[in-house]
Amino acid sequence: MANVSDNSTAIFFEDQASDARAAEIRRFRKRIFVENKGWKLRVNGEEERDDYDACGAILCGLWQDKHLIGSFRAQRCDRPYLSAEVFSHLSDNQPLPKASDAWEISRFAAAPNRSDAGVQLYALLIAFAQTRSARCLIAVADMQHERLMRRLGIVTRRYGESKQVGTDRFQKPIFAVLGEIPIASQPAALLEKLTQRLQNVEIIDETLVLGHIALSA
């Protein structure tokens, strides 16, 4: 399996600030979610796109040797966001947050057979949260992603039990769980390990004044 190399770059940018990069990510999402996984999502031509790509969304793309190998979307929770408006029925235990120190992560996608890219994306999630002093990251995760987070040692907290949220084009049921990654609860050893996974990745955050993320364990 290939590893993320010194030629890797992660870029955070506002969805409407770079049409070309945003379109590349939406085409990537269509390949991953619609073509590979068979999810029934809204498609416009070669792009997967929904209403939450606007409203101040921040996109993250991970490129290796100029090839996109992973991406996710971040949305501040004091604005309309997918989990609260579409998947609130997955929360049995508490109301979903509506605060500026909570961020939703959605459309988390890694290239097939690139589990290294998935780990890098989780490291980028934590780095993103730290630069914004986020209290937590909210997400609807399928069972595969929840298992990966547990293997990595990422501390999560469910808002409810897993439930079926639909079927794919093969009529196979899709189960998901809604919950959060509480940033302050992450073990120091985990944060150090994830920081090390980003040592060979150039990280550019165009939404910050300085334009770069400062990483610390």
Image (cartoon, rainbow, N blue to C red):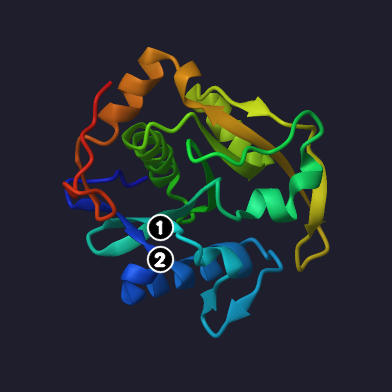
Residue type at the position of mark 1: Leu
Contact, mark 1 vs mark 2 (Cβ under 8 Å): yes
Residue 77, percent across and down? Answer: 55, 45
Instruction: Report the amino acid beneath label 2.
Output: Asp
Q: Residue at x 36, y 37 (%)?
A: 132
Viewer-closest of 100 and 169: 100
User: Relative to residue 6, is residue 91 depicted above or below?
Assistant: above
- Image x and y of residue 182, in percent: 53, 25
- Which percent across, then down, holds residue 126? 40, 33
Residue where numbered disc 2 is placed: 15
- First of labels 1, 2 by sequence position: 2
Q: Which mark is residue 133?
A: none
User: Looking at the image, which is closer to me, 117 or 51?
Assistant: 51
Q: Quick one: label 1, few (<14), some, or many (20+) residues within 10 Å?
A: many
- The dot on residue 59 is 1
Instruction: Say what secondary structure mark 2 lies in.
Output: helix
Can you see residue 173?
no
- Position of the C terminus, as image quadrant, is top left
Kindly give the residue lying farthest to the top in the view shown: 188
- Looking at the rendered structure, the secondary structure element under dot 1 is strand
Establish if 100 lies above or below 159: below
Residue ID at (40%, 58%): 59
Q: Distance from label 1 to label 2 (Cα)?
A: 6 Å
Check disc 2: other Cα within 10 Å, few if <14, some if 14-19, many if 20+: many
Q: How many marks?
A: 2
Looking at the image, residue 18 sits to the left or right of residue 210; the answer is right
